[in-house]
Structure formats: structure tokens, C-alpha cells
Image: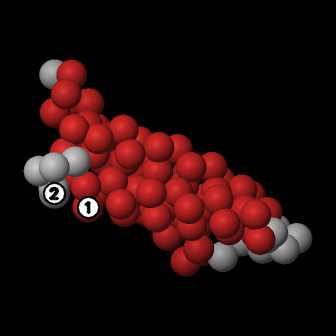
Amino acid sequence: MSTSFEEVGISVIGAGILGFGLGVLLSNFYSNFAWPIILIGIVIHSIGMYLVHKNKHSKNLALSDALYWICWIILLGITLIFIWRYFL
């Protein structure tokens, strides 16, 4: 089964928003909006990653699986940093 343009687009948009949020985090002017932007990016990118991975893996490719899970681990790390910084 092939990956659709919309699935890839969702992942790319989420990654872009995530990247923008990380950039904003470094800026004093927009720093109050950084974490909400990062969280929106994580949600959108995660949906896209899930759809692409789900549809692309009728074949089991070890490298693709590894990269998929590494990305999830990184997203979890960003989420834990957010929780630690703002709620603990």
C-alpha cells in the first residue's frame, strides 16, 4: 500500500510547526508561545507519522521501524521536558 500525499503532508506540516516552536523557544519575544506551538507540532507530526508508518509497512523494514521509534522517543523526551519544566 502506498503512502498518500495527505499523510506525508500532515507529517511534514507537524514537523515544520514543531521546528518553528523550537525556534520560538529560543526567542525572547515569542517565548510565551513556544510550548503551545511545540505541542501542536508534536500532535500533527505524530498523526502524520502514524498514518505513514501504518500504510507503508506491509513490508517490514528494520531501518524504517528503527527511525519511526527513535522519532517517537524524541517526541516523548520533548513532552517530558515540557512537563518537568512547567508542572513539576
| Residue 73 can be seen in this image | no
Q: Amino acid at mark 2?
A: Leu
* Left or right: 61, with 85 as reference point: right
Please determine whether, in this image, residue 33 is positioned above or below residue 62.
Answer: above
* Left or right: 7, with 12 as reference point: right
Direction top: furthest residue:
88
Please determine whether, in this image, residue 65 is positioned above or below residue 69.
Answer: below
| Residue 40 can be seen in this image | yes
**Quadrant assignment for the C terminus:** top left
| Residue labelled with disc 1 | 23
Q: How many residues crowd around disc 1 within 10 Å: few (fewer than 14), some, or many (20 or more)?
A: some
* Left or right: 5, with 66 as reference point: right
Front residue (pair 15, 52):
15
Direction front: furthest residue:
29
Front residue (pair 55, 36):
36
Which residue is located at x 19 percent, y 28 percent? 86
Q: Residue 63: which quarter of the image? A: bottom right
| Helix, strand or loop at mark 2 | loop
Q: How many residues crowd around disc 2 within 10 Å: few (fewer than 14), some, or many (20 or more)?
A: few
Which residue is located at x 64 percent, y 59 percent? 10
| Helix, strand or loop at mark 1 | helix
